[in-house]
């Protein structure tokens, strides 16, 4: 494990400046970033389809890192991590478990988005004692209605983005209207605030493997989420075309005692469009 920790008197709370470290577990070298004050239960971030560590919105990470130890990481076969992308969400959850335990943690809070939320559910079901609190944004349950349609939606929006020389996330995450378009541009701009030590983009083959894993997750028999007793915050926009918004309501029904926030006039990236409100809600929810 990398022991080049930052001295406590210079705690980094800006994701743009978070150092990239590595740790090796079971033959896989995981790249990860750390920020915020050390100590206590860390908040581990589980990223979305095709994403690397560079895809986290600093307007959400930075407020959480003011008072919490935050960790982001690349799954095997993605970005700066070695290995291959697994063919199932469950195997991705096993990799996440290996990574977290290799850092010596036996209790974490989870912040997850989209595919990351699917991985987080499998992790919490398999290792309930590891997870304390769970944030599930822009995601849905195993076997969720129409979740397997994400493949067609994704490829269609990638085509639309290519034709307009835009980032696909502008189409996939945001409504194409007067509020959505500027919110999309602002979000993409924020993702480039980190200028040094940036991650390698995901390879096409790795992205396709992830897509198939999501499709398989969507077509599988539902998990019994009634066993999840963790405090859970579920959030989405009201018009999610990637992981339909009704699936957030479905998760809310299945996870007893969970909280649900649906943001108006927004899509899959509703938490990024409404980052001011959502960051406050997430900080409050994750507070000790």
Image: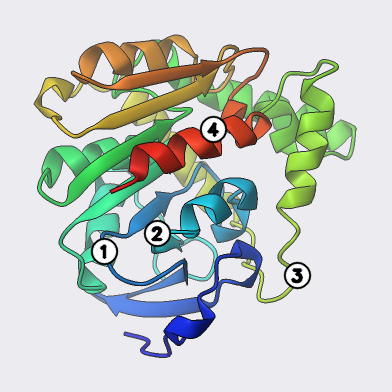
First in residue order: circle 4 vs circle 1: 1
Q: Dot 4 lies on which element?
A: helix
Q: Dot 1 lies on which element?
A: loop
Residue at x-position 56% and y-position 71%: 18
First in residue order: circle 3 vs circle 4: 3
Quote the CA–CA distance across marks 4 and 1. 23 Å
Q: Which residue is mark 2?
A: 68
| Residue 72 pos. (x, y %) | 45, 60
Q: Which residue is mark 3?
A: 195
Query: Taking 231 as reference, is 8 left or right?
Result: right
Residue 11, above or below 228:
below
| Residue 13 pos. (x, y %) | 55, 66
First in residue order: circle 2 vs circle 3: 2
**Do the residues bearing badges 2 and 3 touch, measured as CB atoms within 8 Å?**
no
Residue furthest to the bottom: 4
Q: Dot 3 lies on which element?
A: loop
Residue at x-position 60% and y-position 26%: 270
First in residue order: circle 2 vs circle 1: 1
Residue 278 bears which disc, if any? 4
Residue at x-position 82% and y-position 15%: 177
**Which one is in front, 204 or 70?**
70
Quote the CA–CA distance across marks 2 and 1. 8 Å
Quote the CA–CA distance across marks 3 and 1. 30 Å
Residue 171, above or below 89:
above
| Residue 14 pos. (x, y %) | 61, 65
Quote the CA–CA distance across marks 4 and 2. 16 Å
**Do the residues bearing badges 2 and 1 touch, measured as CB atoms within 8 Å?**
yes
First in residue order: circle 3 vs circle 1: 1
Q: Which residue is mark 1?
A: 40
Q: Residues within 10 Å of mark 3 (few under 14, many from 20)?
A: few
Q: Dot 2 lies on which element?
A: loop
């Amino acid at each position: 494990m990398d022991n080049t920790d930052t001295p406590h008197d210079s705690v980094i709370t800006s994701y743009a400046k978070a150092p990239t470290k590595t740790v090796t577990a079971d033959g896989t070298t995981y790249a990860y970033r750390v920020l915020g004050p050390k100590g206590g239960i860390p908040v581990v971030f589980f990223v979305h389809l095709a994403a690397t560590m560079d895809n986290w919105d600093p307007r959400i990470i930075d407020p959480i890192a003011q008072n919490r130890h935050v960790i982001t990481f690349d799954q095997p076969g993605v970005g700066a991590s070695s290995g291959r992308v697994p063919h199932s969400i469950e195997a991705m959850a096993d990799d996440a478990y290996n990574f977290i335990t290799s850092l010596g943690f036996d209790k974490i809070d989870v912040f997850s988005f989209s595919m990351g939320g699917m991985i987080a559910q499998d992790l919490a079901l398999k290792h309930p004692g590891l997870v304390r609190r769970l944030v599930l944004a822009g995601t849905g349950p195993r076997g969720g209605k129409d979740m397997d349609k994400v493949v067609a939606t994704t490829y269609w929006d990638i085509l639309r983005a290519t034709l307009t020389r835009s980032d696909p996330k502008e189409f996939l995450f945001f409504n194409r209207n007067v509020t959505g378009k500027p919110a999309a541009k602002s979000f993409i701009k924020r993702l480039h605030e980190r200028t040094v030590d940036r991650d390698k983009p995901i390879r096409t083959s790795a992205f396709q493997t992830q897509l198939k894993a999501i499709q398989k997750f969507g077509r599988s028999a539902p998990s019994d989420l009634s066993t999840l007793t963790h405090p859970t915050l579920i959030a989405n926009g009201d018009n999610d075309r990637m992981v339909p918004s009704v699936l957030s309501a479905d998760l809310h029904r299945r996870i007893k005692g969970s909280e649900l926030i649906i943001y108006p006039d927004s899509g899959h990236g509703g938490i990024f469009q409404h980052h001011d409100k959502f960051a406050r809600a997430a900080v409050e929810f994750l507070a000790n």
